[in-house]
Image (cartoon, rainbow, N blue to C red):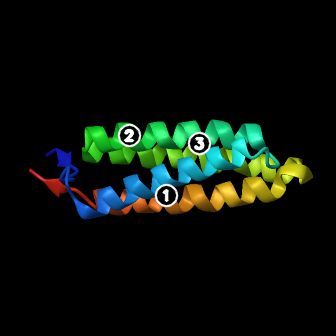
Amino acid sequence: MTRVAVVTGGSAGAAVVDLARAGLGLWHLSRAFRGSDQAVLHGVLGVRQLAQAVLVARAGSGSAHTLSAVVDTLHGVTMVPLAVADPRRRRFATEQLWIATVLAVAEAAVVGRGSRR
């Protein structure tokens, strides 16, 4: 039996996650353009979050949201060594870990447990 995740392209939960991610991307870009601490990292993350929001919303599938959750999880995992090893970037890395966790959980919630065919 195949397990199939079900996400409707117009689902309200998916739209909220996609809009939140796009807003986060714009926030990161605004931080980068204002020359804030970690401006380069904010710029890279802003572009990534916006691209991810557009691609996932465009695909509108459970698989896209699942892959998006994996990307967020990997991002969060990469922040742990940064938080531990670099005191100058510890706050930034810790914030990113929390953001990545919230987004990964939200993406997983959008997909749900899937359904059996």
Query: Callout 2: helix, strand or loop?
Result: helix
The percent coordinates of residue 100 (x first, y second) are 57, 55
Residue closest to the eye, 104 or 23: 23
- The answer for how far apart the CA atoms under marks 1 and 2 are is 15 Å
Q: 80 and 57: which one is in front?
A: 57
Q: Nearer the viewer, residue 102 or 114?
A: 102
Q: Position of residue 74 (x, y in %)?
A: 57, 44
Q: Earlier in the sequence, mark 3 or mark 1?
A: 3
Residue hosting label 3: 46
Residue type, numbered disc 2: Val
Q: Earlier in the sequence, mark 3 or mark 2?
A: 3
The reply to whether callout 1 and callout 2 are in contact (CB within 8 Å) is no
- Disc 2 packing (10 Å; few <14; some 14–19; many ≥20): some
Name the residue beneath numbered marker 1.
103
Q: Amino acid at mark 3?
A: Gly
Hey, what amino acid is under mark 1?
Leu
- The front one of 55 and 37 is 37
Judged from this view, the residue extending furthest toward the left is 117
> Which residue is at a point 35% across and 47% down the rendered structure image?
65
Mark on residue 54?
Answer: 2
Label 1: element kind? helix
- Residue drawn at 74 percent across, 53 percent down: 93
Coordinates of residue 69 in the picture (x, y in percent) = 44, 49
Give the answer, above or below, for where 102 lies relative to 46.
below
